[in-house]
Amino acid sequence: MKRFALIPLLFAVPAWGQNADDEVLMIPKPIEVIFVDGIYDSQIVTQDVAGSIDVLGDEILDKISPVHPAEALNSVAGVNIHRGSGQEHLSAIRSPVLTGGAGAGSFLYLEDGVPLRAAGFANVNGLFEAGPEFADKLEVFKGPGPALYGSNAVHGLINVQSSDIDAPNRVKFMGSDDGLISVQAAATQGSFRASVSVVSDNGFREDSGFDQQKFQLKYYNDFGAWSVDWLSSLNNLNQETAGFIQGDDVYLDDDIRFTNPNPEAFRDGKSYRTQARFERDLEGGKTLALTPYARRAELRFLRHFVPGQALEKNGHSSVGLQSAYYDNSFNIGADVEYTNGFLYEFQDNPSRFSFVEGLHYDYEVESLVGAIYAQKAFDFSQNLSLDIGARAEFTDYTYDNKASDGQSGRFIRVADRNDDFLTITPKASLRYNFDDKNMVYARAARGSRAPQVTDLYSVQLNQIAGEAEVETLDSLEAGFKGKVGIFSTELAAFTMWKDNFFFRNANGFNVVNGKTRHNGVELSFTGQLTKWLSISGDGTLAKHSYDFALDEGSAANNITEDNRVDTAPNTLAHMRATVTPSEGVQMEIEWRHVGSYFTNPGNTAKYPGHDIFVLRGRYEVSDAITLFGRIDNLFDTRYADRADFAFGNERYFPGRPRTLFFGLSSEF
């Protein structure tokens, strides 16, 4: 609150907020955000947006041919996604790599503008439920999302935009030298486009393979004054999970890094979604858009990363409606969503410490979310414009405990209760165009999220039911987009304050009312040096620190103000050199850098960081057929995809060794 006093002139609405929850949105055509066939229509539009956004188009996605979304998204400045076993991951966007409720609730994942999950029921591994295999582009907004977004768009959002129905028919085969096989196909017939993806991966560690199937059906047509854009998606994942290897620097040991100490671990997930955007043009250049949607998500997995290894089952079903009324200068809308979800956790194994044998949790939660938002753009001159907006959102949870009330080890089953939260999140941005190629901007925004259901009702020792509050993030950002010599360049500097940070310490206990501070500078550039050589890159220099002190009686968990937040490297960087010696032939080498970071809140354990290289190549055999390949970890560096410290041990997900991927794609 006090920090917003730094920017009162930027806000036309009160700068207060307490809680929010939904992930609903509807995209307008004002200055800050433009809806056409994605959140951002093109690179030209992103140049005009007063904020930090990145669009990975289909050419980039084809070149990378990612097996995991992290392989593409980590090329964006400020993004750091840790890949776990199989399709698991933990995300960071202008943030530390966050876990638990913080990891699930701090980032908004969408497909064609609709969130993959209800906000209070988010999945920390949420990207595996999306369909980047069928995407026309991946869109990344860094920092608190625009006024159109509710809970979870705190540190940023990622939208997976599906290909249009008039995209070419496609078939793609890919394999690897360690057992991955992937087949993707998409075809259009009339107003329908069907896409399918089947992947099987043996994994490079023992008992670490996965099988995943995805299907997507898209329909577009006009009915009188209305256009209809309908999308349905199905996803099924069956994964044999490899757990952490434990011990000092064991990711360097060839005798250990390929092993799996948890061969019994698994993750099975299913999701189903359908949505339809109905849009019509009105008089005066106005547009009305209505998007009803429904979703179902189910997940079963073994909690291999904690003592006791309980089995967790969770799921939820949702129905909702997004609405927007907009033109080129304003957007107003209202959203509503109803969700019914459940969580069941049972430990078959004998008790270990406070992780006791038997039932931990069995509860259901109903959620009702309603939101209104408004956004308006003002042009003061041909060069200067202001965009202001705000969102008000009310979230109501009704919790029903299906087990007996009381305590079992560290786990507390609370009595039935009702909790509600209100948030108001203002946004404002100022943009000045020097010409059609160069602009500067300033942006102030608040992001917030209502607590995740697990934050509130999977209560543990030292926690009180209902104690978790709304998390808020206040952000100030300034940036430049334009040309510097031959380079297209984007530069952004940001400072952010987070209140009511809810996280788990190195012993797995919940900590409430945390405060963190985030400062950083991001740079990205691309330039054509010669007709056959181009270079591009991105870099991030950031400091993520605790803004409070905490005495937990353990050196690993004690927090001194200004301690670095764990799993938050100061430096991230990528550099790519692309050679096109002749038409239809392309080679690229990429350097990926992750700086050192502390692995626990007390800053007593540290990972030194790593540098790895990727070599890619493409050859267009004909207009319809392309051969491609890449070598990940070209120099076979021993590194960790994720380093962690928990329950008194250093532990790691080791990085993939040098691996050859190869394939063929065809368009017709």
Image: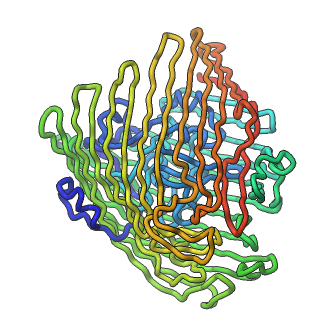
Q: Position of residue 383 (x, y in %)?
A: 17, 33
- What colour scheme does the image use? rainbow
Can you tell which quarter of the image residue 364 is in? bottom right
Decide: is 152 above or below 582: below
Find residue 661 and report its horizontal and vertical position in percent. 73, 31
Q: Quadrant of the C terminus?
A: top right
| 490 over 298 or under it: above or below | above
Choose between 619 and 285: the one closer to the eye: 619
Q: Is residue 234 visible?
A: no
Which quadrant does the N terminus fall into? bottom left
Residue at x 48%, y 85% (from the top left corner): 417
Q: Residue at x 63, y 86 (%)?
A: 403
Let me know if residue 66 appears in the view: yes
Left or right of 388 in this view: 603: right
Work out whether 20 lies above or below 429: below
Taking depth in this image into account, of 88 and 34 the one nearest to the observer is: 88
Q: Residue furthest left?
A: 380
Q: Position of residue 142 (x, y in %)?
A: 42, 47
Q: Residue at x 53, y 29 (%)?
A: 60
